[in-house]
Every structure is written in C-alpha cells, then in structure tokens.
Image (tube, rainbow, N blue to C red):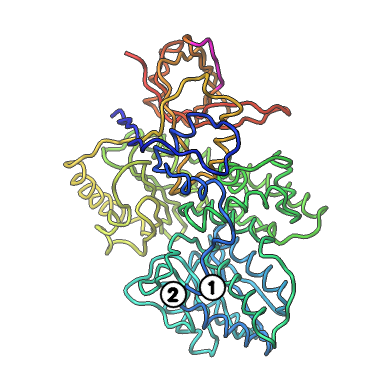
Amino acid sequence: MNPLWTLREAGAEVETPSKVEGQWPHLIGKLLAARGFTASEQIDKLLFPKLVDLKDPLILKGMSQALERLGDAYLKKEKICIYADFDLDGTSGLALLKTGMLALGFSEVLHYQPKRLSEGYGFHAAAVEELKAQGVSLIITVDVGITAHAAIDKANELGVDVILTDHHLPADSIPKAYVVINPNQGTCESGLGYLCGAGVAFYLLRGLKRYFHDHPQLPKNNWDLKEVLDYFTIGTLTDMVPLVDDNRVLVKHGLVKLAETKKAGLRALLEELDLQGRALTSQDVAIRFAPKLNALSRMESGILPIDIFLLEDQTQAREMVRQVMKNNSTRVQLQSDAETEAQELLKTWPHQDFVFVASKSFHRGVVGLIATKLTQVYNKPAFVGSVGDDGMIVGSARLPQGQEACLVEAMGSAAELMSRFGGHSAAAGFEIAETKVPMFLDRLNGHFSELREKPKPLEIFYDVEATLPEVSTNLMKWYDFVGPFGAGFSIPLIHFSNIQVLSKRDLKGGHLRLKLFDPDSNSSIEALLFTPTPRQLETLNAVPGFYNILGELQWNYFAGQKTIQILVRDLKAMS
C-alpha cells in the first residue's frame, strides 16, 4: 500500500524574530509556520534558548529529601554506588552523575551496570547483596528501578538506602525506596516527564550542586555543570525523548559542548568518525556516533560504553576506540548474516500481518536491529529471537514506522505463554520457550487479524513544498539553526515535485546514491536513499524518470568537502 503524503496545516504569516539579523529565507518562515511557530516571541525562544530559563530541579517530587540524604552521606563519608541501566541513556546518566559527584568532593562513588546478555535489564536483588558486601550504604539508580520491588525490598532488609531515579512509567504500585525521583510517577507535578534517565540524573546533579552551595557544612567550588552537558546530550538523543522545553535548551547547548569535548574517549571516537572540528547535529550523534558505543553493550566484548565515557588518557583512548570500531564491525557482520538468514527463513512464512523468526545462530545482542530491518523489508511488525541451548528464546519486537498498533498489547494476548515481556508500543522485548511458539503465533495471528479489519493507511506528514534552487548554503545555515531535531521536534520533511532521477548507484549496506535534476531550473543535487523498501526499489525501476520526492536536507562531508544532499524518505513516480 502506498503511504498517503499530507501537508502539515500551515500556520499564519510568521513575524520576523527580534533577534534575527538580515534576511532569512522564505522557506524557513514557512517551515516554522507549519510547526505552529508564528509569533516573534515564540521564535526567539525556539532559536535562542537560554540555560537560565531551565526549570528548578526542586520541583521534582522527592528532590529535597534526596539532596538531604546525599548531603548526610557526604558528611559521613559513606560508600555510594550509582546503579545504572546498560543502555546509552543509563550510561550517560551514570557518567554525568559520577563525574559531578566526584567534582563536588564525594570520596567513594562506585558504579554498577548489569550485563545486557548475562543479567538482563533491571535493578537486581543479587546486585544489591553484592554491593552491601562491599560496604555500600547508599545506592542511586539511574534509568532503572521503578518496577523493581524485589531489589528495593532486599535493600531495605539489608539497611541500604536507595535513591531511585527513573523516567519509565510505574506499575500499579511504586517500590518503597528511601526516595523516588521520577517525573512520570503520577503524583509528580514538575512537568518534566519528557526527561530521559540521564536527564533525571542531571536534574539531581543540578539540585546537588545548589545544595552544596547553600549549606555551610558542605564544600564550595566553581565546577561547571556544562562540563557534563555532552553526556546529557548523548543520553537524550539516543533515548529519543521529546526535544521540547528544557530538553531542547540543554541539547542545543550540549551539541556545542560535545563538539569541543576534552574527554579523551569521546574525543577519540569523534576523530575516528571524522566528526571533529565541525558543528554536530542530533543526527550525527544518533546515527553515526551512538551506535558504535551501543554495540559495546550489545556484544559484551570486554569494553563497555562507560569505559569510553570516563577514560582520561588520550593514548589509551585511541587504542580503545580502535577496539570499539573492530567490535562494531563484528556487530555489523553478525547482523548482516542474521538478516540474510532471517529473510531466507521467511520465504515460506504463512501469516500476512506479522513476521516471526528465531534461530540459534542469531546473537542476542543484535535481535532488535534485525527486527528493525525486517519491519523495513516487510512493512509488518517483526518478532526476532535468539534460541538458547536451554530451549528458551530471548527476542525483540519492532513496529514499522507510522503503523498504529501496540506490541505490548499484542504480546499481552499471549501473556500466559511467555516467561516475560515488556517495553513500549513500537519496541519491546520478550522471552518464551521454543515449545510454546506455535501457540504464540496463533495468538499473534488472531490479534493482528482483528486490527486488519479496521486498517488505517500509513500517512506521512511533510512540512513545506520547495524547489531545488531554494536549497542553498544560506538556507542550510538557517535550517541548522532551527535545530536540533529529534523526537517531538522532527526533522523537517520537504516535498519536491517533478524531479528527474537521472541515475542510481548501489552503495554498501543496500543503500542507494541518486542523482536528482530539476529541468525547470537546470539544478541538480545528490541524494541518498537508505534501506529502500521493495516498493521503492520497484518504483525506481523507471530510472531515468520523473518523480515526486519527500526528503530531508543534510550536509555531506566527504574527502574534506562539505556539500548539501537530500536524504530521501519516500518517492513516487509521476503518472
């Protein structure tokens, strides 16, 4: 089915912002109007966000109690452990909180992250026992714990206080931690529910710095919170939380801090990826930088992302980054092999509304990536599992972009068959015995068949219509300034009409390089089409030919040159 392209409802005429000097392109005004930004005051706030406008951390429920406990722990020289999730959100929160606490003067700050493959997600009671044995009397969780009743109960039993910081939605009841800081617990009125786990940790650190400043018994120093904005930015962009309000302010400033970071590990990785010496975009971080770090926790090859984050020695950093890239190459190969095997296994797949595939040869660390690929190939919900020697399948599920369904509800239709499952509507995890898969597939088939009876066409909203001559260096300067883009403030999508695709060239990874030409203005531009769907490939069989194109604008850095290119999101042949 061809997706429906819909122009966003345009707003009124845009007022020229008071802080804008000179002429800005008409297309930028149209873009902002499409997003509802029309008043000068609105646009000033969007383009020139100020750190002084951030919300007070004390509006978070539990913050005052947490700060008092941490102040007491400092004076008593208690041994503290930061327990963080293994993903980049948790790792970023761990890095910023540990860095900040040590800078403020805390003497003993340990950290702990469960292993993705051997321990799995969560705040674990066994880890609490281990930390108690090491003399830890206070645990701060980051990005985890809001449903961890057993671990909190164990901590209470052992006399270990837990400051639980998280952003995930709680279950029916909240664990009885010493204090809970979570903007998404129903009784918190902070309005900061868009923060990721690293964001909540950053607000705890903001509160802690002020608490130290205000209390005579505690030391004072001039350490600057901006020193950890690079960590905040990585966590926020990789967790895909909305880039609105405080998140937008902090990421806008944080991208600048990351580009000029002095942290040895981050700097070495930026250099390795040829991202140094230039302004960074949210896409640079989310698409090029972060996946290399994420591969470390996926593969558990010895180095973990936190090792890169906290590294101080430049020589050691370069060597470690070489291992990061080698690890990522292994991940890419395992993923590629698994994707090939998955598509081969699915050649005789009988169900029309979803796909499921599991294999002993699938590495557990890449099943989520395979599932994402399969949603792109088949445009259906995809369930992918790694079969263990014990006959248990551990897997991930993904939903195609733009499809309205809920994976957790789908798996809930077979809840009693599963060892565990959970996650979000579009991305979830599961564990099930191999012997129960046939019954599981029957339940999924029934669930998705019901949804099919009331289908909704896939709709892609675009912001503005433009011509190729409007895509200029001056436009790109303003386009970048309107960013950062991400969840809640998506990358602008532009519609180009009557464009000739002169040629297409295959690139490594199954992507395509296109040459676009506008005969009306004699303008041309390079374009990329990542992971084309079967429908898009079939559409491009008519090259050379004329097309309508939906695309994003971006810079292409290659061989020391900086040029503009279009990242094609979708295309349709002109009839």
Nearest the eye: 61 or 533 = 61
Nearest the eye: 102 or 20 = 20
**Mark 1 element type:** strand
Residues at discs 2 and 1 in contact (Cβ within 8 Å): yes
Give the image location of residue 186, x and y in percent: 35, 71
Q: Mark 1 points at which residue?
A: 141
Quadrant of the image containing the C terminus:
top left
Q: What stretch is highlighted in magenta?
A: 521-526
Q: Residues within 10 Å of mark 2 (few under 14, many from 20)?
A: many
Nearest the eye: 289 or 229 = 229
Position of 501 with respect to 52 (left or right) is: left
Name which quarter of the figure residue 92 lies in.
bottom right
| Residue 529 part of the magenta segment | no
Amino acid, disc 1 = Thr
| Residue at the image point whose x is 73% and y is 54% from the top | 265
Q: Mark 2 points at which residue?
A: 148
Q: Is residue 440 above or below residue 379?
A: below
Question: Main SS type for the magenta part?
Answer: strand
